[in-house]
Image (spheres, rainbow, N blue to C red):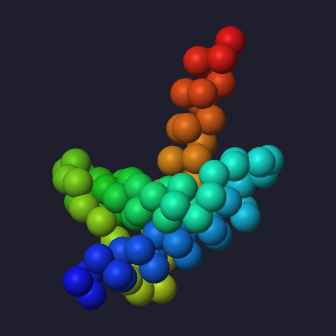
Amino acid sequence: MNNILAWVILGLIAGAIAKAIYPGYQGGGILATILLGIVGAFVGGTLATFLSTGSLQLTATTFSLPGLFVAVLGALVAIWLWHMINRRAYR
């Protein structure tokens, strides 16, 4: 149960920071922000593992300051990908 709570807190913090950094309006409420942060933790953790080891593994970051930094970077990538997918869908 503590692990799930840590994921929710990490997701909320990382998603909120990423939404504040990314230009423009993203929409969504608190649940979307948490999900964005959790997806960002997985995207960031996977990219960090790939860049450091050269192998593609689905991993997540830990609840720490470097983990938060990687989760925010992953959430920024997730926001960018979401905008790229939605921009093409509405053309």
Q: Is residue 49 left or right of residue 27?
A: left
Q: Is residue 57 visible?
A: yes
Q: Quadrant of the C terminus?
A: top right
Q: Is residue 45 left or right of residue 59?
A: right
Residue 5's x, y, as percent?
35, 81
Residue at (71%, 54%) from the top-left corner? 22
Residue 66's x, y, as percent?
45, 80
Q: Nearer the viewer, residue 51 or 91?
A: 91
Q: Quadrant of residue 46?
A: bottom left
Q: Is residue 48 left or right of residue 58?
A: right
Q: Quadrant of the N terminus?
A: bottom left
| Above-or-below relation of 52 to 12 | above
Q: Residue furthest right?
A: 24
Residue at (46%, 58%) from the top-left corner? 35
| Above-or-below relation of 31 to 2 | above
Residue 28's x, y, as percent?
63, 52
Residue at (69%, 49%) from the top-left corner? 27
Residue at (36%, 75%) from the top-left corner? 7
Q: Residue furthest top?
A: 91
Q: Quadrant of residue 47?
A: bottom left
Q: How many marks?
A: 0
Residue 25's x, y, as percent?
77, 48
Q: Is residue 6 left or right of residue 16?
A: left
Q: Is residue 40 visible?
A: no
